[in-house]
Image (spheres, rainbow, N blue to C red):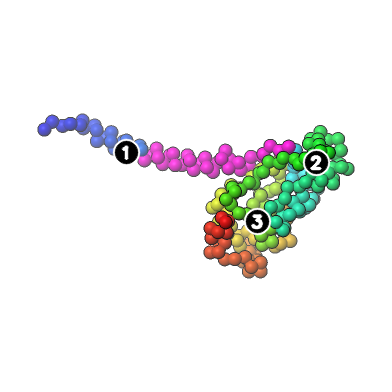
Amino acid sequence: MAQIFHRSTNTISKVTIYGAVFIITGLGYLIFAVNQSAYYTDVNVARQQPVPFSHKHHVTDDGIDCRYCHTTVEKSSFAGVPTTHICMSCHSKLWLNASMLEPVRASYATDRSLEWTRVNALPDFVYFNHSIHVNKGIGCTTCHGPIGEMPLTYRANTLYMRWCIDCHKHPERYVRRREDVFKADYVPPSDQLALGRQLVKEYKIKEPRIITDCYTCHR
């Protein structure tokens, strides 16, 4: 019986199969890389705001405590976006004619809120409570990064579920004393793990099996 396929067909089929494997692998890596990139996560990308607010100037240079502007962070799930009245408590005396603050003055005069752009926004199906984390010794910079060094605010972490779960699995790596929670220049001590284990017990942080349960964040 005559040979139906040319002998080179075997070689072509092998090259095609192996090539397909490499192409699929490459596509998978490309999708993963895009998923982790700033293009998709907005990590390290400053967001456009109605006023170019600088945490570096207000927090680090002027020493304003986080809670002065984010008034509900210790008692509510939401940290609180500062009202125009809070801004004007200082800027009715300082930088009175600065052009960049015109939106703030207009908001105060018309009683219409500034429309700030959320930087660290979570999906609607995720439950997150600021007060729980703050009162359990999780600092602002743990999630928000070096906020005191940001002239314009940007997202410092992906906020992906696996990133959150890593902390819930190993809270001793991140928990700090409550008096250090709002320190923008906080640096973990050399004995962080020993301190962390002590604080996990002292602050009654639940075991990882419980706080990694789906219901903790998805209710």
**Which label belongs to residue 111?**
2
Q: What residue lies at 77% left-to-right and 40% top-to-bottom?
A: 112
Instruction: Write the residue at 58% across / 40% down.
Output: 38
Mark 3 / mark 2, whichever is N-terminal? 2
Q: How many angstroms separate mark 2 from mark 1 (CA)? A: 66 Å
In the picture, the quarter occupied by the C terminus is: bottom right
Which portion, as a residue range, is magenta? 21-50
- Is disc 2 placed on a helix, strand or loop? loop
- For the N terminus, the image quarter is top left
**Residue at image x 61%, y 43%?**
43
Q: Is residue 23 rendered magenta in the image? A: yes
Q: Is residue 103 rendered to the left or right of residue 215?
A: right
Look at mark 3 in the image and give the residue it sits on. 129
Image spot of residue 186 (x, y percent): 70, 55
User: As drawn, which residue projects farthest toward the front?
Assistant: 111
Give the number of the disc on residue 17. Answer: 1
Q: Amino acid under label 3?
A: Asn
Q: CA distance from mark 3 to mark 2?
A: 29 Å
Residue 19 in percent (x, y) is at 35, 37
Residues under numbered marks 1 and 3 in contact, where contact means CB atoms less than 8 Å apart = no
Callout 1 amino acid: Ile
Tell which circle, 2 or 1, labels the residue nearer the N-terminal end.
1
